[in-house]
Amino acid sequence: MSAPAAYSIEAEHLRRVYHRGPEEIAAVDDISLRIEKGSFTSIIGPSGSGKTTLINVLGCLDNPTSGKLTLEGRVVFENGQGLSEAKLTRARRDVFGYIFQKFYLVSTLTVLENVVLPFTFFRKPGAGEEVPRVLELLGIDKRIDHLPGQLSGGEMQRVAIARALVNKPDILLADEPTGNLDTARSEEIGRILQELNTREGLTVILVTHNPRLAALAQRTIELRDGRIHAA
Ligand SMILES: Nc1ncnc2c1ncn2[C@@H]1O[C@H](COP(=O)(O)OP(=O)(O)O)[C@@H](O)[C@H]1O
Ligand SMILES: [Mg+2]
C-alpha cells in the first residue's frame, strides 16, 4: 500500500491561457504551490488577478493550458493531458465541496431538499448520516422546511455550505463566499470555514477580498497578474 499523500493539491507551473481575439491572456501564469492536507489557505489579490481561474483549475472545474496538477497524490493533469471527463466528474463529486459568491439555491425547493440535492447525482457511502449533523453544525436545523426566499443572505450561504458538505468532501473551495454578505454575516461564514478546518479536518481554500477573513487562514497567497506575488 502506498503512503497517504501529504498534500491535497500540488500544482507545478500551472498556466491557464484565455484567447480574446488575437490577444492571449495568461489568467494563471506559471503558478506552483502545494496545499497541505488539513490546511487553511486564503487567496487574495486585486480583481482580475486570476483568483477565480486558479481556484477553478485547482478544483478541476477548468483545465489548465499547461503544467501539472496532482490531487491527493494522483496526477490529474500533465503534458497538456487531463483525466477523462468521467474521472474528472468523480474527482469533483468525491473530493471537492464548492462554495460560490452566488448561493445557487433552487428557489422552489426547501432548505432540506436543497441540501440533499447532491444525492440525486451521487451519494458517498454513509453520506446520509451526515445530514442532521451538518444541518446542526451550520445552524439551519430549525429552517429545513423553509424556502430560500424566506431566509437571510447569511442563512442562504449556510445552506449552500451544508450542500457542499453532505457528500463528505476532503477539500472545500470557496470563491468569495461572502461577496454578497454584510460584515457580521461575513465573519460568521469565516468562523464556520475555520471550524470546518480545525474541527472536521477539511482542507480549505478561500478566495476573498476581505482581509479579516483572509487572516483566518494559516497561509495567504497573494496573486498579481496571474502570478504569485507573495505567499
Ligand atoms: N472566460 C474568460 N475568457 C477570457 N478572459 C477571461 C475569462 N475568464 C477570466 N478571464 C480573464 O482572466 C483574468 C483573470 O480573471 P479571474 O480569474 O476571474 O480573476 P479574479 O477572480 O481575480 O477577479 C482577467 O484578466 C479576466 O478578464
Ligand atoms: Mg473572481
Image (spheres, rainbow, N blue to C red):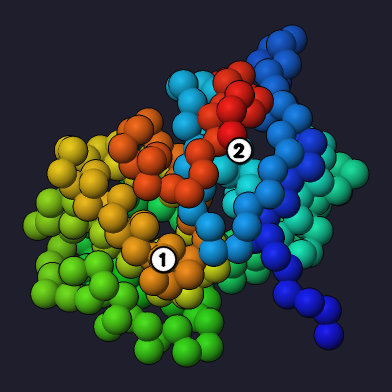
Horizontal placement of 14 versus 189: left or right? right
Tell me which corner region of the image, top left, top right, bottom left or bottom right, holds residue 95: bottom right
Secondary structure under badge 1?
A: helix
| Furthest-top residue in this view | 22
Q: Residue at x 22, y 52 (%)?
A: 188
Q: Name the spot of residue 158 as percent of width and height, x first.
A: 26, 59
Q: Which of marks 2 and 1 is nearer the N terminus?
A: 2
Q: Which residue is drawn at 59% across and 34% down?
A: 231
Tell me, yes or no, if residue 36 can be seen here: yes
| Furthest-front residue in this view | 218
Q: Mark 1 points at which residue?
A: 198
What mark, if any, has residue 54 been given in the picture? 2
Q: Which amino acid does label 1 sit on?
A: Thr
Where is 51 relative to 138, above or below?
above
Q: Is mark 2 within 8 Å of ligand 1?
A: yes
What mark, if any, has residue 85 been given in the picture? none
Q: Which of 190 and 168 is in front in this view?
A: 190
Displayed-image quarter of ligand 1: top right
Q: Number of labelled discs?
A: 2
Q: Do the residues labelled 2 and 1 touch (CB within 8 Å)?
A: no
Horizontal placement of 162 versus 45: left or right? left
Question: How many neighbours does mark 1 have within 10 angstroms: few (below 14), some (14-19), or many (20 or more)?
Answer: some
